[in-house]
Amino acid sequence: MNSVGNYFDATLIRGLDEGLGTPGLVQALHGTPRDGSLELTTGATGPQGPEGEPARPFRWEGDIADHAALSALTAKLGSAHAGKAWRVVSSGALAYWNGTGMDTFTDAFGALGSDGESCSVTIGSVTTGTANSDLQVTVSGTAPNLVLDIVVPRGVKGLEGPVGPPGPIRQAADYADGSHSDKAVPVWNATTNKWSGRPYPGLRGPWTIREDRAWDGGPGFAPSQFTVTATTMVIATLQVPAQDTAWLPMITGGVVVRPHGTASEFGTRVDAAVHIGSATGQTVALGTGYTTGLQTRARFQPHFGARNITPASTVGVIPAGQATTLVVVLHRAGSANFEYQMAGAEIVCTARPVGVL
């Protein structure tokens, strides 16, 4: 025996949108134990319901082979995976997991389009716009040759940073930069009203010979001699390297000499002099001896043997870039023989730059 419930279990209920209040509109009910249908007219529009939850954003997961693989994957998905989406390769459909079920969009992917025409894009002008303006990009030209002109907004002025360390002096506005020799120093030029690099104006050296050894390891003074009859005698040569500026030798030191013999020793004087380049070169130092039979030390002092020496004079000046030899010579004035001792003999040369200020 069939009950009313059996009939309604197999009944399909359909709503007919034929308009409310239409004359002659009836509702039909037809039912059997195996099939049934109930047609109802649609009712009036109800009030708007509450706002639903926002849709989950798509989380693209890539391709999946077919619907069988998609079904196997669905069993492993939960609410935490809502928003994940796949392209079903076999059908081209888009499958979207909404948190409880899979929504399928069959027309989400179209057929592969034809290749587009290749295009060449070059950068045209790049200019700076006003602060806080938008980036402006203008495309000009005709495809496939296009040109992009860009206007970049100017940045806002930043905060002033801390005071930095001193900058290179050669970049200063009042410095006349140029070639610089080693150890150059800035010197004010009253003509250009600028600083410029000049050779170091201070004293250079010293270079010395002390008894039997020179500063560079070379030979020192000649061995002692006790009966010298020559009028002149070279006893040492001092080698001085080239300098980056012209200079004057400033000589100190001395040697021990003594005239001896008969009474003529009191009329004989032995001087020690320093010459540039040779025994007859320009004199730059002199140590005056004494007319006595006792040993005396002829002490070197600057001496140029010329009148009217001024800062601009070239007497005794050794040019820049030129190595030189200073020759120590004994000069006898008188008829007596003399002796010379190497012990205690010394020459000290200091270079005083000229013309660097």
Image: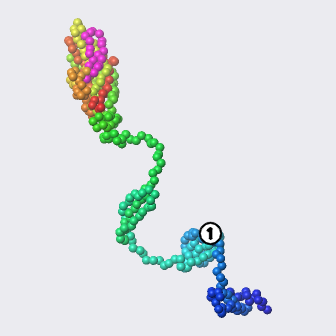
User: Residue at the location (46% across, 57% down)?
Assistant: 132
Percent x, y of residue 286:
26, 19
Q: Circle 1 — which element?
A: helix
Q: Is residue 99 left or right of residue 144?
A: right
Q: How many numbered marks does the figure carry?
A: 1
Query: Would you identify the image quadrant in which residue 341 lies?
Result: top left
* Location of mark 1 (residue): 81
* Image quadrant in which you'd find residue 88: bottom right
* Residue 171 seen by the camera: yes
Q: Residue at x 41, y 58 (%)?
A: 129
Question: Which segment did they paint magenta?
Answer: 283-302
Query: Quick check: 17 above or below 228?
Result: below
| Amino acid at dot 1 | His
Relative to residue 122, is residue 159 depicted above or below? above
Indicate how the structure is coloured in the image. Answer: rainbow
On the picture, is 60 further left or further right than 238? Answer: right
Q: Which quadrant is home to the N terminus?
A: bottom right
Residue at point 34%, 26% (across, down): 206
352 vs 338, nearest the viewer: 352
- Asked if residue 175 is among those painted magenta in the image, a careful observer would answer no
Question: How packed is label 1: few (under 14 Cα within 10 Å), some, or many (20 or more)?
Answer: some
In which image quadrant can residue 113 be found?
bottom left
Decide: is 221 above or below 101.
above
- Give residue 95's position: percent from left, percent from top: 58, 75
Quadrant location of the C terminus in the rendered image: top left
